[in-house]
Amino acid sequence: MIGRRLMRQMINKGVDAGIDKTLGAKKDKRDMSRSEREQLQASKTNSKRAKKGLRVLRKIGRF
C-alpha cells in the first residue's frame, strides 16, 4: 500500500514536471515582445488547467 502511494506520487511529480518543461518560457521575459509574453501567460493558464484536469482524473482512477 505504501509502495503504491509512493509510486503514484513520483509519477504525478514527473507528469507535472513534464508539463512545466514543455510549456515553459524559451526566452527571457526581457527579450520577448508583448505578444510573446501574452502567449506565455496563456500557455501557463492552460497548463494549470491541464494539471487540475489530470489531478481529477487521477483521483477518479483511485476508486
Image (tube, rainbow, N blue to C red):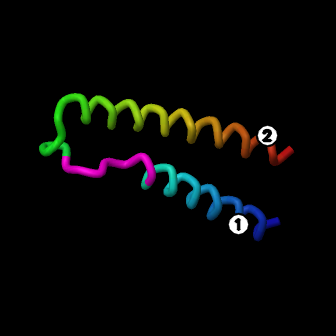
**Residue displayed at 64% across by 61% down:** 11
Q: Which residue is mark 1?
A: 7
Residue 54: which quarter of the image? top right
Relative to 48, does residue 24 appear above or below in the rendering? below
Camera-nearest residue between 5 and 18: 18
Q: Which residue is mark 2?
A: 60
> x%, y% of residue 25?
31, 48
**Residue displayed at 49% across by 37% down:** 48
> x%, y% of residue 9?
65, 60
Mark 1 vs mark 2, CA separation in Å:
17 Å
From the image, which quarter does the N terminus lie in?
bottom right
Q: Is residue 19 left or right of residue 6?
A: left
Query: In the image, is residue 18 part of the stretch drawn in magenta?
Result: no
Q: Amino acid at mark 2?
A: Ile
Relative to 40, does residue 10 appear above or below in the rendering? below
**Residue displayed at 56% across by 41% down:** 51
Question: Is the magenta region chiefly helix, strand or loop?
Answer: loop
Residue lying at the far right of the rendered structure: 63
From the image, which quarter does the C terminus lie in?
top right
Residue range (magenta): 22-28
Q: Earlier in the sequence, mark 1 or mark 2?
A: 1
Number of labels in the image equals 2
Instruction: Name the secondary structure under disc 1.
Output: helix
> x%, y% of residue 47?
49, 39
Q: Amino acid at mark 1?
A: Met
Q: Is residue 44 left or right of residue 35?
A: right
**Residue displayed at 37% across by 48% down:** 24
Camera-nearest residue between 1 and 26: 26
